[in-house]
Amino acid sequence: MTQVVEPRESAVPATAGELLELVRTGQAATRSQLRMLTGLSRTAVTARVSSLTAAGLLLIGEELASTGGRPPGALVFNKDAGVVLAVAVGRSRSQLAVLDLDGQELAADSRDHEVGTGPDVLLPAVARRLVTLLDQALPVPSEREGRPVLGIGLSLPGTLDPERGLSIGSPVMSGWDGVELAPYFTEVADASLFVANDADVLARSELLGGAGAALDDVLVVKASTGLGLGIVAGGRVLSGHLGAAGEIGHTIVDAAGDLPCRCGATGCLETIAGGWALVGRMNAEAEPAGQPVGHVRDLVALALQGDSVARGLLRDSGRELGEVLAVAINLLNPAAVVIGGDMAAAFDFYLAGVRESVYRRAAPLATRDLQFLPATHGDRAGVVGCGALALDHVLAPAAVDARLLAG
């Protein structure tokens, strides 16, 4: 999608942070383009650009070792002006990364942990791992000083309060609700912590160089141990009033009857389509050789190896999800549905079930041009999305202006 840039109409003069946003997003590359887009005078643009270059956020083309054919005076966003940290915590795995300001990974780490591990055990270990990753990504002390940690993005399953930085409703992460998360990271860096649920960060990962970067309206399914839905509308991630938008896995469906769910209710979609439910059915029905299936990732691996029972379970899950997803498609009319999470590794089998229900239940107009796509970043989507969460905050014009004001 080609972005059409129009001159700014606000009566309030554009700030330095807004000028940086224009350069960073490719809407402007010279001072004259900034003047045209903002209506600022030559003097005002020069002053704002000078403050951004002094802070290291902008570079002048001729100052770079390789300008890539940029004209003299071209403005370039400095992706090396700092880093952000990403922490994607799931029910049984935590993925960490250090990323530059373009969202590219500089160092990463992924480790399994025991189901039910609380924050007092898991997060101190996560903090130590982050320190190690920073040492790997920025081993030279002078480089570390010139590339400070600007923010930390963290995701958890369930509903989180972004203002207070804590979980307020996670049926799968016992002991996490109401616990302030920022204090666990104070020894890592003097940087703000930003939190969101796992489906929302999956959606953000698509905006960072994925399907959502080219399409304004996308639904991003996280099909893993649980089921969640990230919603991109008008190019923005929608989280809802309490941050609970997209809790598709806990929609009550007739097919689930009175089956008990992890959330305490009965009849939720997850009880027949969530990864945890599929694992239970696999162990009960198939009696696989060797050790029982312990995680949905194991079930997916069996499906990819040709196990017919595992393939059937994944297709059934997709079919049940599609029954509810069709309603969201009718309501929101997305251009694409992106499938992510552990089950997306068996994309063809899972999607077969999703498409079957969606095309049967959704309106023809809503599905006429609908695309179904695998998550762009695959197994790394969660940690990429956490990085995008941090970048969205620390590079927002208001945040940049505040940082410049603070010196």
Image (spheres, rainbow, N blue to C red):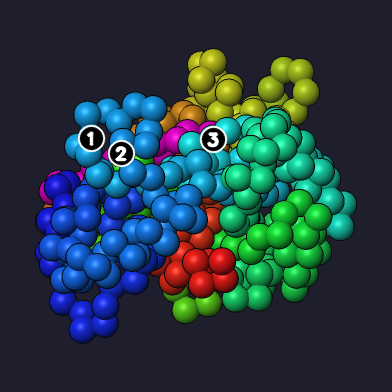
Label 3 residue SS: strand
Residue 195 sits in quarter: bottom right
Instruction: Check whether the beta carbons of the residues at disc 1 and disc 3 lie within 8 A of each other.
Output: no
Instruction: Check whether the beta carbons of the residues at disc 2 and disc 1 lie within 8 A of each other.
Output: yes
Residue 162 sits in quarter: bottom right
Image check: 136 left or right of 27? right
Q: Which residue position is annotated with label 2?
A: 61
The amino acid beneath tag 2 is Gly
Label 1 residue SS: loop
Q: Is residue 123 magenta?
A: no
Q: Is residue 379 magenta?
A: yes
Q: Residues within 10 Å of mark 2 (few under 14, many from 20)?
A: many
Earlier sequence position, callout 3 versus callout 2? 2
Instruction: Name the front one of labels 3 and 2.
Output: 2
- The residue at 39%/50% (across/down) is 58
- Percent position of residue 81, x then y: 51, 47
Choose between 350 and 43: the one closer to the eye. 43
Q: Which residue position is annotated with label 1?
A: 70
Instruction: Name the front one of labels 1 and 3.
Output: 1
Magenta extent: 368-380
The amino acid beneath tag 3 is Glu
Q: Which residue position is annotated with label 3?
A: 105
- Percent position of residue 144, x then y: 67, 41
- Percent position of residue 16, x then y: 36, 66
Real-space CA distance between mark 1 and mark 3, rounded to the nearest whole angstrom: 26 Å
